[in-house]
Amino acid sequence: MTYHNVGYRVLFDNYKVIYITDTRTVEGISAKNYDLYLIEGNYDEDEIEKRISQKQKECKYVYEFRAKDSHLSKQQASEFLLNNMGENSEYVFMHEHIERG
């Protein structure tokens, strides 16, 4: 199965926004000193591995495999932000996965 990355750079006069979602990686993407970063931070890497392990033990469907193949972890998003944000930049984590029941 092939997944496609989605991202938009939006410029309002002197205000720069980048919106990154439904992507497995941000490798090769640079967005230095944008004013606002809207980026998915879908899951915590350690937490998702625990959920995968538990569901496998219980012979349950493991949605998390697909999540790892089509979304950024909080750690990946944070690394991207640290490498790109300027002193006055702001960010919002979006599309955060919440495990129910």
Image: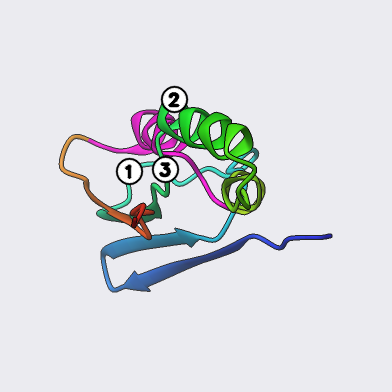
Q: Mark 2: which amino acid?
A: Asp
Few, some or many residues within 10 Å of mark 2 (<14, 14–19, 20+)? few
Q: Does the magenta stretch include residue 73?
A: yes
Eyeballing the image, is 72 above or below 96? above
Q: What's the distance in space between the residues labelled 1 and 3, CA to CA?
A: 25 Å
Q: Which amino acid does label 1 sit on?
A: Asn
Q: Is the magenta stretch mostly helix, strand or loop?
A: helix
Q: First in sequence, mark 1 or 3: give its number.
A: 1
x%, y% of residue 86? 26, 37
Q: Based on the displayed image, in which of its 4 quarters is residue 88 positioned?
A: top left
Query: For this rendering, which residue is in front, 27 or 11?
Result: 27
Foreground pick, 80 / 93 = 93
Q: Over which residues does the magenta segment extend?
A: 71-86
Give the camera-side residue of 64 and 88.
64
Instruction: Label 3: state its secondary structure.
Output: loop
Above/below status of 40 relative to 11: above
* Whole-percent x, y for residue 64 in the image: 57, 47
Q: Is residue 100 left or right of residue 55?
A: left
Q: Position of residue 29 (x, y in %)?
A: 58, 44
Residue displayed at 47% across by 39% down = 73
Say which amino acid is labelled 3.
Tyr
Identity of the residue furthest to the bottom in this view: 12
Query: What residue sits right under mark 3 in the picture?
Result: 43
Separation of residues labelled 1 and 2 (CA atoms): 29 Å
- Residue for badge 1: 33
SS type, badge 1 = loop
